[in-house]
Amino acid sequence: MARGRTAFFLFRRREREGERLTDRLGSALRRFLRAVLPPALLLALGLYFIWQSWRGELGLAAYQARRADLLKAEAARAAAARELAQWQARITALRTDHLDPDLLDERVRALLNLANPDELVVPLDKPASPPAPPSGTAPLAPQSSPSPR
């Protein structure tokens, strides 16, 4: 019986040594995780906020894009305001209480397609064919290109 009892204690000792080994590994793993996990999480959180501040929906890149859109919109508004001022000046000049004869004459000529006899009319469109030479002059001879040697 002493021998059986000794074997039992040896078995228990080996069992306890195995538990100690897993306890040591578990405690080492826990110590490692306690030492590494909080700084790693804080680093990841900091990197997330840095990324969002640069590339996020409200970040610096989006701010620059919105600023460029704002400048374009302000330029378009200024152009529209200038055009509005021009049209208002023309409308004011055509009112009956303040009639500008030059502007009225310009509008009548544009609508009726008329001109005064003493005015020179310069067409802006190109004619389909070259103009005919005046009578009594010979037409110009076509120029030939020099032949390469």
Image (cartoon, rainbow, N blue to C red):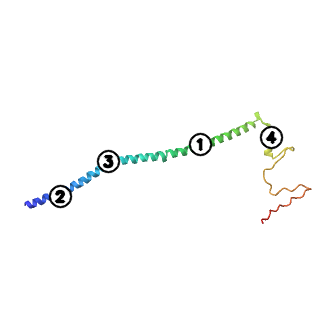
Identify the residue under disc 4. 105
Identify the residue under disc 2. 14
**Do the residues under discs 3 and 1 have CB atoms within 8 angstroms?**
no
N-terminal of the pair, mark 3 or mark 2, is 2
Real-space CA distance between mark 3 and mark 2, rounded to the nearest whole angstrom: 31 Å
Real-space CA distance between mark 4 and mark 3, rounded to the nearest whole angstrom: 91 Å
* Above or below for 147 versus 115: below
Neighbor class of circle 1 (other Cα within 10 Å; few <14, some 14-19, many 20+) is few
Left or right, 19 with respect to 68, comes to left
N-terminal of the pair, mark 2 or mark 1, is 2
- Depth check: 77 or 112 in front? 77
- Depth check: 145 or 54 in front? 145
Identify the residue under disc 3. 35
Give how far across and how far down residue 88 sits, in percent: 70, 38
Neighbor class of circle 2 (other Cα within 10 Å; few <14, some 14-19, many 20+) is few
**Do the residues under discs 4 and 2 have CB atoms within 8 angstroms?**
no
* Above or below for 128 versus 101: below
Q: Check disc 3 and report its element: helix, strand or loop.
A: helix
Name the disc covering residue 71, or none. Answer: 1
- Depth check: 15 or 98 in front? 15
Q: Residue at x 76, y 34 (%)?
A: 98
Q: Quadrant of the C terminus?
A: bottom right
Of the two numbered discs 1 and 4 in the rendering, the one whose residue sits closer to the viewer: 1
